[in-house]
Image (tube, rainbow, N blue to C red):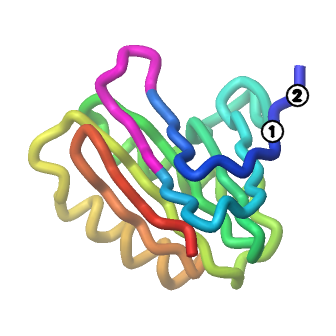
Amino acid sequence: MSCSQKVRHSKIVFEDGKGKCKMCFDNPNRRVVTKILVDNCAITEGKRCDFLLLDHNSIEYFIELKGKQVAYACSQVEETIKKLTKDVLAIKYSFIVSTACPLTTTEVQIFKATFKKKYNCSLIVKNNICHYCIN
């Protein structure tokens, strides 16, 4: 089974198995991107996020769809970045879509600062559904 798939859809959607959390990427120019199943495919042991999307500009988008444990989701994304990023200094985005409220804690704020400083990665945490446009 392949862990990756090249697509050029105008809308790329990642969902959790329960239908509670969803990450939607708009791809208006229908650029070729690579969808990667990380959890139990590209990485089978240790902490890891659910998905990775690679775009034409080598920008990496790490995605974790989570219930209530946002801080744990941050650690899953960080471990995935350490294992799968091609270039630590390249631009990266990480998305945690969660059912938790509140989404921002002191611990999550520390992760946001760490991600930016160590990995050049913006950490975005949203409730239930998140939309992002690939330029």
Determine the secondary structure under disc 1.
strand
Residue farthest to the top, as pictured? 18
Task: Report if the CB atoms under discs 2 and 1 are less than 8 Å apart.
Answer: yes
Tell me the quarter of the picture where residue 30 sits: bottom right
Drawn side of residue 62 relative to residue 108, left or right: right
Q: Residue at x 57, y 81 (%)?
A: 120
Q: Residue at x 51, y 39 (%)?
A: 13
Q: Residue at x 46, y 30 (%)?
A: 15
In the image, is residue 44 above or below residue 33? above
**Rendered location of residue 25, percent (x, y):** 49, 54
In magenta, the rendered stretch is 16-24
Amino acid, disc 1: Gln
Residue farthest to the left, as pictured? 102
Mark 2 surroundings: few (<14), some (14-19) or many (≥20) residues within 10 A: few
Drawn side of residue 120 relative to residue 122, left or right: right
Residue 5 circle label: 1
Determine the secondary structure under disc 2.
loop
Residue behind mark 2:
2
In the image, is residue 131 above or below residue 22? below
- Is 20 a magenta residue? yes
Drawn side of residue 117 relative to residue 97, left or right: right
Tell me the quarter of the picture where residue 50 sits: top right
Quarter of the picture containing the N terminus is top right
**Rendered location of residue 28, percent (x, y):** 55, 64
Quarter of the picture containing the C terminus is bottom right
